[in-house]
Amino acid sequence: MKVVLPDNSELELPDDATGLDAAAAIGPKLAKEAVLVRVDGTPRDLRAPLADGERIQILTTRDKDDPDALHVLRHSTAHLLAEAVRRLYPGVKIAIGPPIENGFYYDFEFPEPINEADLERIEAEIGKELDEGRSWTRENVSREAARARFEAEEEHYKVELVDSAEGDITLYTQGDFTDLCRGPHLQDSTPIKAFKLTGLAGAYWRGDEKNTQLTRIYGTAFYTTGNLAAHLAWVEEARARDHRVLGRQLDLFHLEDISPGSPFWHPKGMVIWNLLEDIRRGENAKRGYVEVKTPLIYDKWLWETSGHWEKFREHMFQIPDGDRIYALKPMNCPGHMRVYGNRMRSYRELPLRLAEAAPLHRNELAGALHGLTRVRHVTQDDSHLFCTREQIEEEVYGCIDFTAYLYELFDLDYRFELSTRPENRLGTDEEWDFTESALRSALDRRGLVYELNEGDGAFYGPKIDLHMTDSLGRSWQMGTVQLDALMPQRFGLTYVGADNTEHTPYVIHRASFGSLERFIGILIEHYAGDFPLWLAPVQVRILPVGDTHRAAADELAARLRHAGARVEVDDRGETIGRRVRDAELEKIPRVVVYGDRESADSLAVRERGGEQGTKSLDELLAELRQLGRL
Ligand SMILES: [Zn+2]
Ligand SMILES: [Zn+2]
């Protein structure tokens, strides 16, 4: 048989040859360093057979950053972990141990609970395995043989997995440990140059809380020690930027169990919130949007009409009242449909761009809640653009231009994804050709590079999703621009066209920030709480040196506030050194120390992270106007 190599040359091999045979046919060094074969883009174990005509790529230890190469390394390390745990904790039961993003885990049922201190002991045992060296063997076995083997070992989780496994059953063995596993795995343990167990957590068997709670051990592994060190530094940095920690440290917001997933915004957090609201309002006005305000609770009739009752009910908070059932709105769309439909509309009114940033409630599972990025109380910078078929492209263009403008304000890298017709869809192919090409042209016109998600659109129309990348390189899904031909129909909306007959308008659902809560959570982490001057909740803090300087400090604060700056005076009886340090911890961008030598002509101004210099009040104001955007 023949397989095709990445340079398009063909390699002749005996029938049933494996990836490892192919590597050996190319060269012994390649065979030695090989960790995985990728076949037509899909990872395959080196020991599994190839088939005629397949396009193969051999990955080696030099592909140290390749996600598939890292997966096989980490998965193999997970097996070493299971081997170590079985040796150290007799009676432990093993469940599953897959690779995940940035690492791997393995779930165990321990006879006695373990704690963080045990991780070191287990790490030492894995280290011993690596010193001794392990190699993996792979065998295909019958279901009965696999079942018998794990029954004899009293590994009932594995027995359950054998029973529910589909296709061939394969076992992988290293040392005296055999696991039920589809692979792929390394040839041996030499490529595992660096590993670390990173944490412990509880996890239910098969993710079901009715099942036994297991102990999950997380870890990670790399092809070089340098890569592990860089990863751990990244994790440390991400931890230092955690918006839940910074939210407390900077006094922006707090969360408590009395209303899960619903932030309490403190005055400083509200400064950021209101700045985003000002941007939203100002830009909406410039771009021809009009604001509306619609109710928070509605009779369930509305949700039945919109389709939410059928599809989204379990995420809605319901409020029974006598013989009626109301529900708190999880989205603004149906309310806006009612505003549009409350009277006859003419084509002359279109496009009609309704905007509202109302609080929405979604009954997210308590376990899924996370700081500001996964909440039950959501505030979207929502809009619904009602338009004719001919206006779709122009309106979509306006939406993405708006969004690109917003993200650039925050120096965020963004990218757009276009999702097209799914299998289950409403409407004709001609209709989809038309709407998809309208969205495409709008993206092209803005000169945006975008990714295509074929088949990922909603059943009622194509959509554009907005993703951004923060300063740690993490990608977040943010806003959306979604074309919808269905909801206006469900609400019986029409307009009278130039032809004097009634037509159904299209609606575009658009949110640019996405949710304000989430956007602020991401901004906190993106800036590590060190907001640019224009976004900082407190821009200037004045520290009077002694009691005699208080009056002058207050006067200076009043003058700065009058110019629009956000100013605080810290006149606590602490030393200047202490107060400067506190301002540093609270990430205040400018600190003015006011003592005997200071006056409006000569202020001692300390820039966060920089040196103390001398500025006149006029110079400070000029800087605040420019960088602080007063
Ligand atoms: Zn495995
Ligand atoms: Zn909507």
Image (cartoon, rainbow, N blue to C red):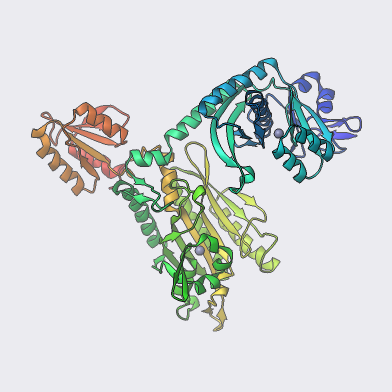
Which residue ends up furthest to the bottom in the rendered image? 500
Q: Is residue 585 left or right of residue 69?
A: left
Q: Quick one: 162 or 19, which is closer to the camera?
A: 162
Quarter of the figure with the N terminus: top right
Measured as percent of width and height from the top left, residue 77 is found at: 66, 27
* Quadrant in the rendering for residue 565: top left
Residue 161 appearing in the image? yes
Question: Residue 24, relative to residue 274: is it above or below?
Answer: above
Q: Residue furthest left?
A: 548
In the figure, 224 relative to 534: above or below? above
Rendered location of residue 198, percent (x, y)? 54, 29
Is there any visible trace of residue 7 in the rendered image?
no
Q: Residue at x 18, y 28 (%)?
A: 575
Judged left or right of residue 215, residue 69 is right
Of residues 487 and 193, the one drawn nearer to the viewer in this rendering:
193
Q: Position of residue 437 (x, y in %)?
A: 63, 60
User: How many numbered marks appear?
Assistant: 0
Q: Is residue 381 above or below residue 222?
A: below
